[in-house]
Amino acid sequence: MRLPLLALLARGPAHGYELKQALEKLLGAAYPQPNIGQVYVTLGRLEKAGLIEGEDIAQSSRPNKRTYQLTDAGREAVAAWFDEPTDEPRVRDEFFMKLAVAPGTGMTDQVALINKQRRHYLNAMRDLSRLAAAEDRDNRVAQLLIEGAMLHLQADLDWLERCQEELEQLEELE
């Protein structure tokens, strides 16, 4: 959450609740909603790190609110984040590790693992389809997030099919 909050502050000063609302509006229901406590804890850490600076704004009928803005160091951190590519392809895949170590354990077979994982992915796909239908069509960012997740799931389903085909061919050779 650290870097997305910094990126939102690159748009201009804001207080914690405004940042939470901006994330929710931008990402829609497809992305886990940030906890306001988590937002403020993160803002406190960013301020201690010198990436943002806060200013207390007096309010007549409410407690003071703290507005934050990026420092030069915060702006550099956001620029570096945008410049850096994200993680490499998943080579350390937990499901694949289960699939690889299952033979010989006597605890499960690989086809059962694949079928269970396939059901899990299909249920997730169904949930995302419902979410896409319920999401505001004008929120293109949220729609793209959902579409990306569905494409990843489809690729995972295709890969499971490939794993099962390979296992069947191995069994035929034995």
Image: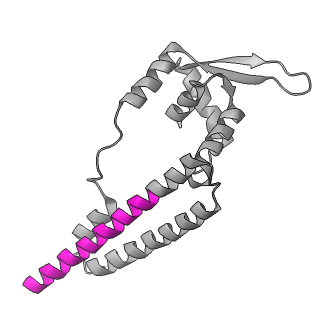
Residue at 52% across / 20% down in the picture?
49
The answer to which image quadrant residue 160 occupies is: bottom left
**For this view, does 164 lie left or right of residue 71?**
left
Extreme residue toward the right, this view: 61
Q: In the displayed structure, does residue 59 sit left or right of residue 18?
A: right
For the rendered model, the colour scheme is one colour
- Say whether residue 127 is visible: yes
Q: Is residue 46 above or below residue 122?
A: above
Q: Nearer the viewer, residue 162 or 2?
A: 162
Where residue 154 appears, as percent x and y from the top left, is 38, 65
Residue at the spot 34% in from the left edge and 63% down from the top edge: 155
Give the residue displayed 40% in from the left and 25% down from the top.
80
Q: Which residues are magenta?
A: 149-174
Q: Is residue 102 visible?
A: no
Q: Main secondary structure of the magenta part?
A: helix
* Image location of residue 7, percent across then percent down: 53, 29
User: Is residue 157 within the magenta segment?
Assistant: yes
Q: Nearer the viewer, residue 75 or 98?
A: 75
Q: Quadrant of the C terminus?
A: bottom left
Picture quadrant of residue 60? top right
Residue 42 location in percent, x, y? 58, 32
